[in-house]
Image (cartoon, grey):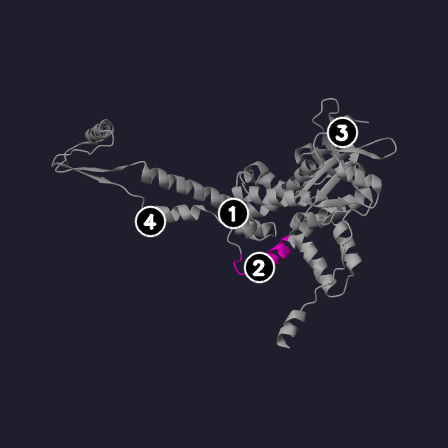
Amino acid sequence: MPLFNQKTTTGMALSDDNDILHFLNPDDTHYVDARTALKNSDIYSIVYQLSADLADGELKATAPRAQGILNNPTKTSNAHAFWQSMYAQLLLGGECFAYRWRNDNGLDLYWEYLRPSQVQPFLLEDGSGLIYNVDFDEPGIGPMQAVPQGNMIHIRLMSRNGGKTGISPLSALSDELQIKDQSNKLTLSALARSIMAPGVLKIQHGGLLDEKQKAARSRSFMRQTASSKNGPIVLDDLEDYTPLEVQNNVAQLLNQANWTGAQIAKVYGVSDSIINGTGDQQSSVQMMNSDYTKSLSRFAKSITGELNNKLNAGVELDLRPSVDPLGDDYADKIASLRKNGVLGANQASWSLKQAGYLPENLPKPTEPVEPTRGGDKDDEDQG
């Protein structure tokens, strides 16, 4: 067989439409890489908070072996750092990867986090699944070709190719980040031109001075200012010095440089109040927590969908530790259900113990505890 007829891959590359556009127009700057995006304080803040809160959530599986690998997925770091790194990459790139190192029986030993640059997904020629080319950092492993999708954890966000790959949320922020970059350059330029000159030295009847003579007088005046050691400046009747002040338009420009994070928060589906924005001043704390929980749950579904597909263990992500770390809101809900007669005293106590709000070895009350009924005291006062 001729060499040019040999096949080098067993699948078709999953290239995005934008890759073709960038190839035809290499000057297109609409791509925003994660390293550049993290230099933006708003993006860093929102990615850090979302990834940390998702990592604070508890992954629960119905199978003990699956629960074990979820609790301790890696050998090189702790579980919280591993999952936060996975979630941060998911939020930045729209997808994240981990390789499943398994024994001969197919049981997971540990997972290895992979950067997107280390992974190339391919679609099998018959369309029956995905395979991956993986380039490991370890010299002893090196590149690995045609890795089956069962050996990969591949979490995706929104997709345009049926869920095979994910779309980075940063792609929707390219114009905003360019505007911010230009705004920063304009602000720095305005500050440099406005503050570098301390004042204006006018020489009366000095119209015959050329450029070199004016520059020499400026340097001489600066030396005089330095030698006076913050003392008064002595001028003759032929000179007049006026110090400059920061104008109002420069101050307004500085205010415009505080570029709002509303657009970034909108892309990630959260309120801008979580990145120290003004947010909705009319919203209550409960409403904001409820909206934030909904936002986290959208990302949680993408995470558990992939883990359930690969582990087949009924994986769920409990977000209660993230949105209610002290458990006070949960205790209030249980108390309300107990007060309304939905739960009995033993059921309420059991629920709080299961949630870790009450210790398991809580002693029994030494005297009967009567439930408080709303409105009794008011009725007695009215009677």
Q: Give the label on residue 284, or none.
A: 2
The percent position of residue 271, horizontal first and vertical second, equals 57, 53
- Quote the CA–CA distance across marks 2 and 3: 52 Å
Residue at numbered disc 1: 176
The percent position of residue 14, horizontal first and vertical second, equals 71, 41
Which residue is found at the position 59% from the left and 50% from the top? 267
User: In the rendered view, would you say 268 is above or below 5?
Assistant: below
Q: Give the label on residue 248, or none.
A: 4
Q: Residues within 10 Å of mark 4 (few under 14, many from 20)?
A: few
Do residues under tags 2 and 3 come within 8 Å of each other at their CB atoms?
A: no
Q: Residues within 10 Å of mark 2 (few under 14, many from 20)?
A: few
* Magenta-colored span: 280-292
First in sequence: mark 3 vs mark 4? 3
Give the quarter of the image for residue 34: top right
First in sequence: mark 1 vs mark 3? 3
First in sequence: mark 1 vs mark 2? 1
Q: In what element is the residue under mark 3?
A: strand
First in sequence: mark 2 vs mark 3? 3
- Quote the CA–CA distance across marks 1 and 2: 29 Å
